[in-house]
Amino acid sequence: MALDTSPEKPAPVRAVAQAIGGWIDRLGAIWVEGQVTQISRRQGMSTAFLTLRDSLADVSVTVTANRALLDSLVTPVVEGASIVVHGKPTYYAARGSLSLQAREVRMVGLGELLARIARTRRLLAAEGLFAAERKRPLPFLPGAVGLVTSQGSAAEKDVVEVSRRRWPAVRIVASYSAMQGVHCTREVIEALQRLEADADVDVIVVARGGGSVEDLLPFSDEGLVRAVSALRTPVVSAIGHESDDPLLDLVADWRAATPTDAAKRVVPDVAEEAQRTMQLRERGRRALLGRISAERQLVTSLRSRPVLADPRGGLGERSREVEALRERGGRAVRHRVDRAADDLDHRIARVRALSPLSTLRRGYAVVTGPDGTALTDPAGLGPGTSVDIRVASGRITADVTSTSTEESPDA
């Protein structure tokens, strides 16, 4: 229950300690996993004291265990070992400290550790953290190379020496951390975050030499894998040897077999690049000279053709062809005009033959009455009627003196 306190009615220390002890006592026995960072076995005492530390966070708890319980284990408990403790949290009011009274201690064996790593691998793979499409390309020539390793290690020496031998101007930004032990995972994550915050770092190399499976366990920690996956800067994993397979290798953008291999992959070789540049320049020069030579041959071939050797040589022949065509065209036009003129004369002759004037010229005449109509019958014309006679060359006005009717030859 909560303590009822006030400035006028404060609770004594013993009451607070008793309340805390009561709250903690309500937890009951629990299973706890961690790494042993310290063991204290005092001479003549039946109780041993261990410090159990979290593998990722900077948190630890004291464990009290019966000495006989620890001695009964097949594998002795040593500093750095991973154990699982079944115990009851206890608060010691006299010292104001919390400890875990161990009832059972189990060593986390290699087989169990590997099984846990396999389960973690399947979990992270299902989330897509190892997918190929998440891999980021490494820069061709990084402005600065971030290096996460332990200070003064052989891995640091290999990466720095190989990188500077390949490209002397390369800048190495080292962020040191423990590369094994209980602090390894946390310190590596902090080192990665420091390099991620540096805008000049274009790629990060996590390098460590070879080691046992237990030494490489921190690099399969789920927290470290997720931290690397969240980075924006490309990461190269150079942990252990080629046969080692920590989960960091799967989430990294590039896996190197060794720290030396990582340096070769991240930093280009200035001699090789200079040689490649010279080869490309030579290939370009040869290609350009070949193209110029081909164009020269083409120009020479064009100049050797008759039409270009003597441009006016073909004009005479073409002018004669044009003149012949003009002559043919003139003859065709004249022939067409002559035929059209003959046809016109024929048509005019036919029209003239059909003209009434032609009939009049043969001695015929057209007689019209007073009303101007042509007369075909003398009936109705009395003596003295004035008529108009149309002949080929003019008109005659006459008065009728008499008329007679003749029977038509066709009757």
Image (cartoon, grey):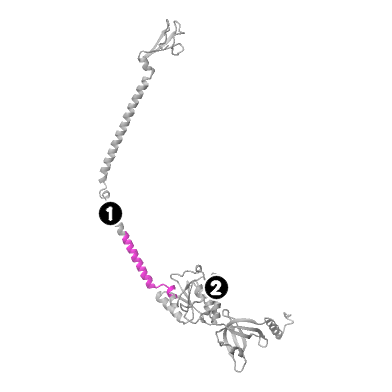
Q: Looking at the rendered structure, which numbered label has been put on residue 4?
A: none
Residue 230 in sight here: no
Quarter of image, res 12: bottom right
The stretch of residues the image draws in magenta is: 262-291
Q: Residue 60: where, in percent of width, then height?
A: 60, 82
Q: Identify the residue at horizontal 37%, vertical 70% (top origin).
A: 274
Percent of width and height locating residue 356: 39, 17
- Type of amino acid at the residue the image marks with label 1: Ser
Left or right of residue 294: residue 127 = right
Q: Is 263 a magenta residue?
A: yes
User: Please, what secondary structure does the residue beneath circle 2 have?
Assistant: helix
Mark 2 = which residue?
122
Give 315 or 262, whichever is nearer the viewer. Answer: 262
Real-space CA distance between mark 2 and mark 1, rounded to the nearest whole angstrom: 71 Å
Q: Residue furthest front?
A: 411
Magenta-colored stretch includes residue 218: no
Q: Which mark is residue 301?
A: 1
Q: Nearer the viewer, residue 84 or 144?
A: 84
- Helix, strand or loop at mark 1: helix
Q: Is residue 272 shown to the viewer in this render?
A: yes
Three-letter residue code for mark 2:
Arg
Q: Is residue 308 left or right of residue 9?
A: left
Query: Quadrant where the N terminus lies?
Result: bottom right
Q: Main secondary structure of the magenta part?
A: helix
Residue at point 40%, 76% (across, down) = 165
Q: Position of residue 379 (x, y in %)?
A: 45, 8
Q: Identify which residue, 196 or 392, lies in the foreground.
A: 392
Number of numbered labels in the structure image: 2
For image coordinates 43% across by 10% down, the residue present is 387
Q: Give the foreground label among 2 and 1.
A: 2
